[in-house]
Amino acid sequence: MFRSRWLWLCLTVLLWSAPAQAQEFFGAIALGKNSSRFGYSYDWKTPSQASQRALQECGSPDCQVVVSFNGGCGAVAESAGRTGVGTGKTRALAEQAALKLCNEPTCKVTVWACNSQ
């Protein structure tokens, strides 16, 4: 009897003290290949849902997903002839990565998105 109570007490404490599983969230950024259109998404449960939403937001047949991310942020930097994409835990890190890949002094961040968690 004492053993079974002890077991239930330990099990209850273990379950209550265990951290909840963090849910992953996904986002994406889509750009129009021949147009100036863009779309983004964040806080979706799957990468596929995030990509579909970004394409819907972009709203042009020439749109393509250029960056997908989870648990953080994504960004796009562009200049007249170059494009860079990046991801990171924060907006600043994603923007830095995109600017580094764009690799031109005239590159500017044109779109970014972050998941809430």
Image: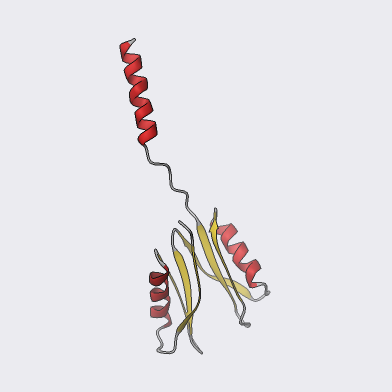
Residue 87 location (% of width, % of height): 43, 68
Left or right of residue 54, residue 14 in this image? left
Q: Residue at x 40, y 89 (%)?
A: 105
Q: Residue at x 51, y 90 (%)?
A: 80
Left or right of residue 61, residue 22 in this image? left
Quadrant (top left, top right, bottom left, bottom right) of the C terminus: bottom left
87 versus 14 height, above or below: below
101 versus 40 height, above or below: below
Q: Residue furthest top?
A: 1
In front of the other: 65 or 13: 13
Residue 55 location (% of width, % of height): 62, 68
Left or right of residue 116, residue 57 in this image? right
Quadrant (top left, top right, bottom left, bottom right) of the N terminus: top left
User: Quarter-wise, where is residue 16 in the image?
Assistant: top left
Q: Residue at x 51, y 58 (%)?
A: 26
Q: Is the image coloured rainbow, by chain, by secondary structure, or in one colour?
A: secondary structure
Residue 52 location (% of width, % of height): 62, 62
Residue 12 location (% of width, % of height): 38, 27
User: Quarter-wise, where is residue 31 in the image?
Assistant: bottom right
Q: How many marks?
A: 0
Q: Residue at x 31, y 14 (%)?
A: 3
